[in-house]
Image (cartoon, rainbow, N blue to C red):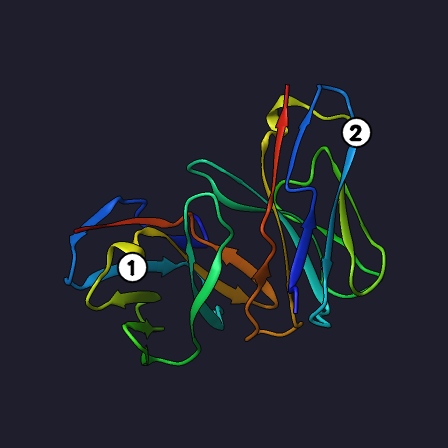
Amino acid sequence: QKEVEQNSGPLSVPEGAIASLNCTYSDRGSQSFFWYRQYSGKSPELIMSIYSNGDKEDGRFTAQLNKASQYVSLLIRDSQPSDSATYLCAVIRFNKFYFGSGTKLNVKP
Amino acid sequence: NAGVTQTPKFQVLKTGQSMTLQCAQDMNHNSMYWYRQDPGMGLRLIYYSASEGTTDKGEVPNGYNVSRLNKREFSLRLESAAPSQTSVYFCASSVLGNDQPQHFGDGTRLSIL
């Protein structure tokens, strides 16, 4: 079983809609959770971090963490074509990083 | 503030050649990492250095060696390049801790013929 699982997509949403990206992790000892955005041909860029259960909002982005269900999600409100990218979920457990393989998001104008 | 700098950005090698990928960070981070990214495979950890003077194997270390030259620099060496090592290589750094994100360089695109 992989440490971090993501649906590879692609997830297609129309411009202005809410995009919902999901991630599950296998170990309850995971301590910190991150979302990275990676444009094609570019490096991963940190967009959100979340450490405790609940929601964390930053502009159009909301990260949600449910440790009981071992589930992290990223909501992107008012999706724009510029949000089209691959989104990587990452977790830390005992100082080690584990990345999911990413979900490709396409936002259609 | 440059962050994490990788050199070179592109490289083409012939099978059997050797080369060293360079990485330097100016954020005073303790930990540094080397990943490779292949289509559909996500990021795979090759080696990491939790702190200056230490290095450890990651998920896919075979065919690679690393050197943590000092706190700023962490290099990745391919001793005898193979076509299977064609990939995009990313260096990352972070503060040591269970709540600290990694910051990535721009990557090195390596092709081995």
Residue at numbered disc 2? B18
Q: Report x, y in % for residue B106.
A: 58, 51
10 Å crowding of disc 2: few (<14), some (14-19), many (20+): few
Q: Label 2 is placed on what type of residue?
A: Ser
* Residue A39 in sight: yes
Q: Nearer the viewer, residue A29 or A24?
A: A24
Query: Is B80 situated left or right of B87 in this image?
Result: right
Q: Label 1 is placed on what type of residue?
A: Asn
10 Å crowding of disc 1: few (<14), some (14-19), many (20+): many
Q: Report x, y in % for residue B64.
A: 73, 37
* Residue A28 in sight: no
Q: Chain of mark 2?
A: B
Residue at numbered disc 1? A22
| Residue at the (64%, 64%) spot, across then down | B3
Query: Is B75 situated left or right of B5 in this image?
Result: right
Q: Is residue B66 above or below residue B14?
A: below
Q: Report x, y in % for residue A5.
A: 37, 52
